[in-house]
Image (tube, helix red, strand yellow):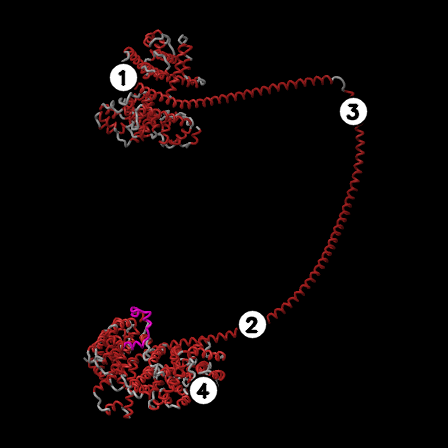
Amino acid sequence: MADDSQRNFRSVYYEKVGFRGVEEKKSLEILLKDDRLDIEKLCTFSQRFPLPSMYRILVWKVLLGIIPPHHKSHALVMNFRKEQYWDVHHALRVIRFINDSTPQVDVFLRIHQLESGKLPRNLAFPLEPEDEVFLAIAKAMEEMVEDPIECYWLVTSFVNQLNSKHKDALQQLPKILEQYLNIEDNRLLMHLKACAAMSKLPYDLWFKKCFAGCLPESSLQRVWDKIISGSCKILVFVALEILLTFKMKIIALTTAEKITQFLENIPQDNTDAIVSKAVDLWHTHCGTPAHSV
Amino acid sequence: MAQQGNVGELLSMLDSPSLGVLEDITAAFKDNLICDRGPMLVNNLVDYYLETNSQQALHILSTLQEPHDKHLLDKINEYMGKAATRLPILSLLGHVIRRQPSWKHKLSQAPLLLSLLKCLKTDTDVVVLTTGVLVLITMLPMIPQSGKQYLHDFFGIFGRLSAWCLQNPGHVAEIYLVHLHASVYALFHRLYGMYPCNFVSFLRSHYSMKENLETFEEVVKPMMEHVRIHPELVTGSKDHELDPRRWKRLETHDVVIECAKISLDPAEASYEDGYYSASRKPCTNLKHHQTDPSASHYIDTQSSYGTSTPYSTPRLTLSQMPGQLPQILSPQSIQLSTEPQQVTIWSPSAVCGMTTPPTSPGIVPSESSQSSSQPYSKAFGTSAGGKGTPLGTPATSPPPSTSDDFVHVSLPSAAATPPKKEDKSDSGRPLLYRQQNVTNSDKSLDTPGSKSSVTLSDLPEFLGGLSFEDSAEKDREEDAISKEISEITTDAEHMVPRGGFDSPFYRTNESLSGSQKKTQSAVSGVQGHGQTSEPLTSSLDKPGPESARETPKQTFTPIDKPCGGSGESPAGNREGTSGETSILTPSPCKVPAQRRVVFGGGQPPLYEHLFEVALPKTAYLFVGKKTEELLKKVKGTQDEDCMASTSPVEVLDRLIQQGADAHTKELNKLSLPSKSADWTHFGGSPPSDEIHTLRNQLLLLHNQLLYERFKRQQHALRNRRLLRKVIKATALEEHNAAMKDQLKLQEKEIQALKLSLQKEQARYHQFQEEHENIVAQLHSQIRQLQHDREEFYNQSQELQTKLEDCRNMIADLRLELKKANNKVCHTELLLSQVSQKLSNSESVQQQMEFLNRQLLVLGEVNELYLEQLQHKHTDTTKEVEMLHAAYRKDLEKAKLCVQQQSQRLEASQKRIAELESQLSKKDHLFVEQKKYLEDVKIKARGQLQAVESRYKAQKRITQAFELEILDLFGRLEKSSLLKKLEDEKTEAAEAAEERLDCGNEGCADAVAGYSEETIGRNGETKPPSTRGSSSSKAGSNSELSTPEKNQNQRFINRWETSMLLEPSTTVPLTVGSLPSSQSFLGMKSRELFRNKSESQCDEQGGTINSLSDTLKTELCKDPNMETKAPPSPNNSLSPKIPESSVGQLHIMDYNETHHDHS
């Protein structure tokens, strides 16, 4: 590749030696320089490396199809998106589903409901579980993205992706978790099974909400990088790592309720390490995605 | 107390007769005083003095230094309180004060002053009062500013004493009153002089009272007649005259003189300024008025003084120096003869004043020797020859004057005021002319030093005219002048001994008083001469000037009058003097005279002339008046009369004189050497009262004397100061004169230098001209020579050019020679060459001939061989040659053809390759294009997706809106159309339910129950029945169709069903306007279906897109057309037509609805 000549020739060896993330930003910049963005490459990159925060939103938008791979049409498309958002917003205001005091996530939810045609007849309708998921994700996303329009689009695209692309895979995740847990730490699995907590683990929080509300945003971003780039297996490894990290505590706990309660409110201080370890674990188990040149 | 005893011893030894002891004792006392600061010694001394009246003690006490003053004053104060010791202690105080100790300023603070004032206020002893007043008067100028607090005490004392004088409450002797009066008079002067405003206001207030009026009339008023208006009364104020600043710059003697200045009394007045003569005049005038009818000789005598001196002086000068100044004197003598006295008065004096002293001092002695004492004495002798008395006077008067130093020159005159006064006045007279000379000479700026006779001769005239005009008219002006003169003359007199010989004053003085010696020129003595001589001479001359008496109408009236007056008086004088030849000094002469006036009323005529001599001024006036009064009243109360008109001092003087007179008479009678002893012896024992009176009188006199001495000292001080000023002024004048001389000398020098400068300049001009001539000559020579030189130069240049030409010619010629030689050589060379060539060419010609011959031979041989050859080749060769040629040509042609073929082949091959490459390029291009197309497609798709999603959103929005609207309408209609037909209602409800189910199916999952539906629907297409019927027929249709087709069909079916469902079959545009709930529901369901189908179409359209590019645009616009086309061939059934129509309808519908919503 012509681009490789411009890159540091050592960058290939860095990984072999053990350095990571040395030339990531630069290589991402090179990737983003292509006029028609190569979505596959971006996907691979995103799976292999953590995204630099300054390009994260852009990459996400591209990967989620909010903006097309052509740079030229970015502005136009974003304008469309914006107009659409405001149109819907306006409509919702007109039919009085939202007003000025409505929280942003609710606004997102209503807009999403309207666009997906699932808008309830009136506001009194109780929220469905999928709406709860949406709200959780939207809340997390709202923390990460400043622009409400971008945020909405990311949330709705993310949710759509989960619902469409990973719908089947998500259902398989608890089984996979058990499987890997067996490989990694049999004793813990035994303990969990002994406590009958295996079925009561917070799967909804972990796999439907994709840890939204469980991990802090800075760590969550890195997890979502992988999800957005198409791999929902990472969720399993994150959950596995959480279990492994807090193994001693979990073993100390004997009832399923307590374990669930603890896992739903894990301490937030060491999440970066957890995520890093999870990514490593994922890489070791599923293999590092190679560059599809 | 060794000290005490020691002091007692010392005191006892104080009056030791031995001089050495005396000195030692005084020294011891002084040492003691220095060492001891206690009051003891001073007290002892004072006691001792009071006891013994020791002069030594007095001397020590009066010279006490600072720290002891307090003790002394305390002691005096102590004794002052005692009546017994009051008088001696007052005299002691007087002594001390007159010494002017350094601590005199402390007197004002001392309690002594208070006690003194108290004593003066309360004491009744006249002697004490008189002494105290004198002490006070002495003290006053010493403490001018500090004494002001006791001002009213002073005034009170004055008031008391003045009243005392009149009323005499103690009934003391008249003689005391005279003394007291005199001292009060002095106090009056002092107070008036020092504090005029306060004093006048006091007088005003004090004597405005009636009881004091008499005192004022009798005592104070006469006193006031003897004072001028004090200037302070005009300019000053009560506060101002008490101002310390006023007194600060005045010394004691200044104060004394200040007081004397305002006095009109000749006895009191200051001599140095003009008040005296000016004051005398009104006084005399007053007297004159008073005595006008009877005593006209007063004026005569007075004026005789004014005129007598001029007469005497010219005479003197004329007699002295007729030979010296004949040219000057002659006109004056002429004038003298022609004119009356005036001219003669002025001119001689002026001449002698200015011309007598030649500039060189050497002449002065000669002149002085000429006019020294001998000639003068001769003159005096001549003048005195007639009389005798003058002869005596010079003999007697010199001793005191010479014995005294200059400082004391004025002492006798001060001590004996009357003679002094005379001296002053008389010496002032002659000096008047000198003064005028001086003033005039000041004007003309030609002092005696100038030699020009013209100014000198003119000056007398000028002076004469001037003074004549001025003085002839009135005596006043003369007096006024004499006032000025008196100032200068007194100064001049003092100058004589001190000033150098160079001083003009000295000269004039000398010339005037001729006989004086420079070294011992005792002024008083000289004046004495002058005085005595002048009146005498005047009296002598009187017969002479009597001729002038005949001209009474002249302005110079005084002259003839004194003649008459003096004519009388000299006679009397002579008589008096002749009678009293024993009297040697002038003052004794006067005293008896006056005495006689007082006491011996009948005698006055005898010594009246003596007054003229001794008291020419006021005293004489008084005497005159006195005699007149005596004549009138015949021995009246003289004292009272005296009081009324004369000053108390004069009265006192007279008293003393009379006393002396009487004394001398007694002495004469007794002719005994010792007076005092005789007095007691021969006069019998006089009554003790008389003795006491006399003693007191003596004491008073002594006091008076001391006071007068004090005054004299003050005057002396002042005189000294004034003298210093005069010396300075004269020195400056001298200096000026010297400077002027120098200036003149320098001017002369300058002129001389100028002359020489002119000469030098002329010479210089001459030299310059000569020099210029020579220079001009030389210049012309130079010019000529230069001209010659130029000519020569030109010639030489010409010659040189010629020389050059010649040289050039020679060079040319040489060149030509060389060239010719060269040519010759060259030609020779050429010649040799040519000869060589010639030889060569000859040899070549020979060879050529040889070769030509050979050629000829060979040509012949060749011809021979050619002939041989032609004979041998003839027939066969031609054909073969022709064939060969033909073959060759054929071969060549074939070869060319082959070549061409191969070339074409190559070209075509190349062409093929090119085309192939082009093809590949094109392919590549195609690929690229495809790629690009793909790219664009993706791009467009991306955008399209966005648009699509947007559109979807819009659709959702509209759905939401519609739902909302429907909801609202539903509510509306629910309420309004409840009463409608129940059948319809149920039907509609059913239909709605079914449709909703359908919609839900489509929305939720398209996969579920898919096949069944399609089958059912396919069968459903034809029969135009409701859905329920179609579904029942579904099973009949067994034909399978592609999902695409199925969908399409399904879609169409739905359409149909929807169309069928709607009973009204109206265009969906009018949906909003239809009021029926059925129609709305239908619309809703239809929309829902259509949306669903459309989304499916879109998905399919995406697949189609990749297959055919051309349809892309149409796909977007109406996918329904596309979808319709494929199913049509498959669907060869009849419903095709209605389908299409319906589809078109649908399309239109869709578009329109879409537009409506957007």
Chain ID, mark 3: B
Residue at the spot of label 2 = B757
Which mark is on residue A62? none
- Outermost residue on the front side: it is B293
Chain ID, mark 1: B
Which mark is on residue B865? 3
Dot 1: element: helix
Label 1: few (<14), some (14–19) or many (≥20) C-alpha neighbours in 10 Å: few
Q: Position of residue B1098 (x, y in %)?
A: 39, 18
Mark 3 on the same chain as mark 2: yes
Q: Is residue A274 above or below residue B1084?
A: below
Residue at the spot of label 1 = B975
Dot 3: element: helix
Mark 3 on the same chain as mark 1: yes
At label 4, the amino acid type is: Ser
At label 1, the amino acid type is: Ser
- Outermost residue on the left side: it is B1
Nearer to us: label 2 or label 1: 1
Q: CA distance from mark 3 to mark 1?
A: 154 Å
Question: Sequence-wise, which precedes: disc 3 or disc 4?
Answer: 4
Residue at the spot of label 4 = B319
Nearer to us in this view, A13 or B1105: B1105
| Quarter location, residue A24 | top left
Q: Position of residue B1026 (x, y in %)?
A: 33, 9
Q: CA distance from mark 4 to mark 2?
A: 53 Å
Q: Residue at x 25, y 29 (%)?
A: A265
